[in-house]
Each structure stands twice: as structure tokens, then as C-alpha cells.
Amino acid sequence: MTIASTVEIELPSPAPGTQRRLRVHRYGAPGSRPKAYFQAALHADEIPGLLVAQHLLHQLEQARTENRIIGEIVVVPVANPIGLSQHLNGRLLGRFDFESTGNFNRGFPDLATVAAERLRGRLSIDPTTNVNRIREVLRAALAEQQAVRETSVLKRTLLEWAIDADYVFDLHCDSESLLHLYASRWHGEIARDLGADLGAEAILLEDDPGGGPFDEACAGPWWKLRALLGEEKPIPLACFATTVELRGQSDVRDDYAAADAAALMGFLQRRGVIAGDPGPLPQPRCEPTPLEGVDVLTAPAAGVLVYRKQLGDPVRTGEVVAEIADLFGEPLGAARLEIRAQTDGLLFARMIERLARPGQKFCKVAGRDPLAYRQAGKLLED
């Protein structure tokens, strides 16, 4: 029977009498390849991933009893116990750390620069040898990262389990959305295959999203090292990392979660992590588009948000996507501000709240062409 283990990791106590911990499930022999890593609800108020992780564990348990685990699979089913404890007036607020360290999915370390210095002159002509050496250096560099606060230790611990993985899946959701995913433009083909398995309606490819999200911390060192050292010796892009947005915050359903987990299992089968026949790859529902091509609509004033386009609707440049009802405007009872799209594309995500604030980003349209106002390094919302 396939090896399986569970590890409990205590986080630093934030206050006397308080202690939180991470639970990590591992399938397969440590060090087996390929390695896949999953975590759910790093943004702790994004609940669909928590349920998907449960279904995934159930299906992995079955694969374990059938001795079908080939590589190593790590699952952190509750990636952010800190955020899960953050309630204010009865509402769970798990996107930002109450200790004022910011967004839980920002600020992960970029290990490429320090790794490049340690690897210079040490790479060989053999790509496999280089992959192993780079992973060793990345693990060592990460272990040297100073972390004292509970949130800092949480982030470092999660990255320690994922930094040497071949495949990394960070399970999130949007406010209201279709299923979509983010990945590096270097991995467009893999992202397209994953999107086909999941039935993704949008696949957003990024180059420099900015902010230091978890997926980039895992996959980014490889293409950054290639840029820094690639002419010296061959450096494969040995980690595919993706942020999977599992629809909207209210889409917590067993049928969705079971299907999503089965799709992830199918992807692992196609990549040789798990034995078995996943069947033919489903027809993709979309082609990848650039993250710079996402039109993020912004409210120009405060008021009641009224959508004129719905999730899944095609949108044309210049079309009215939503209106802001000005509650004190003229003419009385009929004052509206129209907000128009700046691209042709698909409306794939929007804000669930219907009271907008000035400057609030409330809707996303995935377009094929980069937009002038979308700048590399500033592509992710807070």
C-alpha cells in the first residue's frame, strides 16, 4: 500500500494561551517524482477550496488503497488558520492579516537573486542535475529566511513544502465568478490542459504580476534564474504553479467540489503523479489570454451598483457593463453613471456587494489584447 503520513506543525503563539497549527498530508514516498502540492484558502474567507480539498483527500485515500500513487503529493487542506480565526461583528475577514502585515497572498520571498549568486559557476550541462541543484539551493535559501511573527512563519512554512514541487496548486475563489485560473505565460500549454480538465472559462497568463503571490514564489525562480544564468547552462522550467479560482465565495457545493477534485486527479494522472487512465482531455472552453488584457472596471463614484452584463456574457468595447445609481443625484430617482468596457472579452468575475465606493474595482473582463493602462508589476488587486 502507498505510504501516507500526516504532520502537525505548530505556529508561533501570537498571545499567551493561543496556539494555531497547520496540518499537512503527504502521499507517496518523500522525494518521489513528480511532486504535486495543493493548498486551500490562503485567503481564508474563500471557502470553496476547503471543500475541494476534502474531496481531493477522499479521492487520494482511494488511490492510496489501490496503490496508484507514483510520485509525492502534499495537501495542506487549511492553509491559513490565522485568517480563519479573524471574525469581526460576525463576519469572517480572511484576506488581510489583522496584524497589519497585509494580504495573506502577497509578500512571499523572491529567492531567485540569492539563488543565482550561489549557483553561478556550479551548473552542469545536464538539465536534471541542474534541477536537483537548484532545488537544493532554493530550499537552503528559504531556510535562512528570518521569520518571527505568526504570519511570517506561516508563509515560510507553506513555501517550504512547495518550493521543490513540480506542480503547485493554490486554491482560491473570487467574489462572484466563473471558474478561472492564473499561471505564468511560460506554462501556457500546461495551463491550457489544466483548464480543459477543470472546465475553466478563463485562463490568465502573467509575466510579472507584482506583489509576490504564492504561485510566483514557487515557479518564478526558474524563469528568473534562466534569465540570470540561462546562457551559462540549461535551466528547465521545473515548477508549474497556478492559482485556481474556484468560482465565487458562495459556490460551496459538493457536486462542484467533487467534480473539481476529480479534474485535479485527472490532471495528476496525465502528468504521471498518479497511475490510471483519465480518459481523453476535454475540449477546452477557452484559450489562454494575457493578464494584461483583463479590463478591471472601477467605480467612478459611490452608489448602488447595477449590472447590465452578467457572468459569462460576451462584452464589446464601449458596451455598458454596469451603472452606478447616484442616490442624491439629479434628476431625482434617475441619476445613473454608466461604466463601459475597454475591451472585447468575457465577463468572468465581479463583486458580490452592490454598494460601490469611489475607486473600487468591481468587475473583470478577460480580453485577448493587452491594455495600455494595465502595467506589469501591478496586475493583481489588493
Image (cartoon, rainbow, N blue to C red):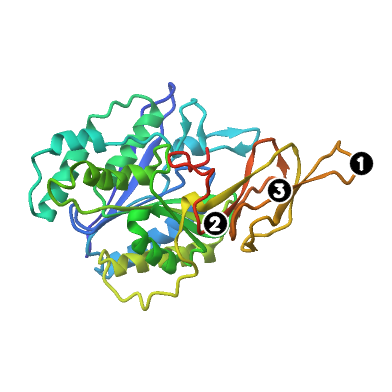
Front tag of 3 and 1: 3
Against 65, is 31 above or below? above
Counting residues from the N terminus, which is met first, the one under dot 2 or under dot 1? Answer: 1
- Tell me how far mark 2 sits from mark 3, CA to CA: 16 Å
User: Which secondary structure lies at badge 1?
Assistant: loop
Q: Name the amino acid type tagged 2.
A: Ala
* Residue 374 spot, x, y in % from top left: 51, 44
Question: Which numbered marker is on residue 332?
Answer: 1
Q: Is residue 225 left or right of residue 316?
A: left
> Which residue is at a point 39% across and 38% down the rendered structure image?
212
Measuring from the top left, give residue 42's x and y in whole percent.
44, 43
Q: Residues within 10 Å of mark 2 (few under 14, many from 20)?
A: many
Residue at label 3?
A: 339
In front here: 328 or 245?
A: 328
Image point 16% across, 50% down: which residue? 131
Measure how far apart labels 3 and 1 are at the Cα level: 20 Å
**Cβ atoms under marks 2 and 1 closer than 8 Å:** no
The answer, for residue 247, to whether it is visible in the render is: yes
Image location (x, y in percent) of residue 289: 47, 58
Q: Name the one closer to the observer, 369 or 362.
A: 369
Element under label 2? strand
Separation of marks 2 and 1 at Cα, in angstroms: 35 Å
| Label ID, residue 366 | 2
Taking depth in this image into account, of 344 and 78 the one nearest to the observer is: 344
Marks 3 and 1, the one that precedes in the sequence: 1
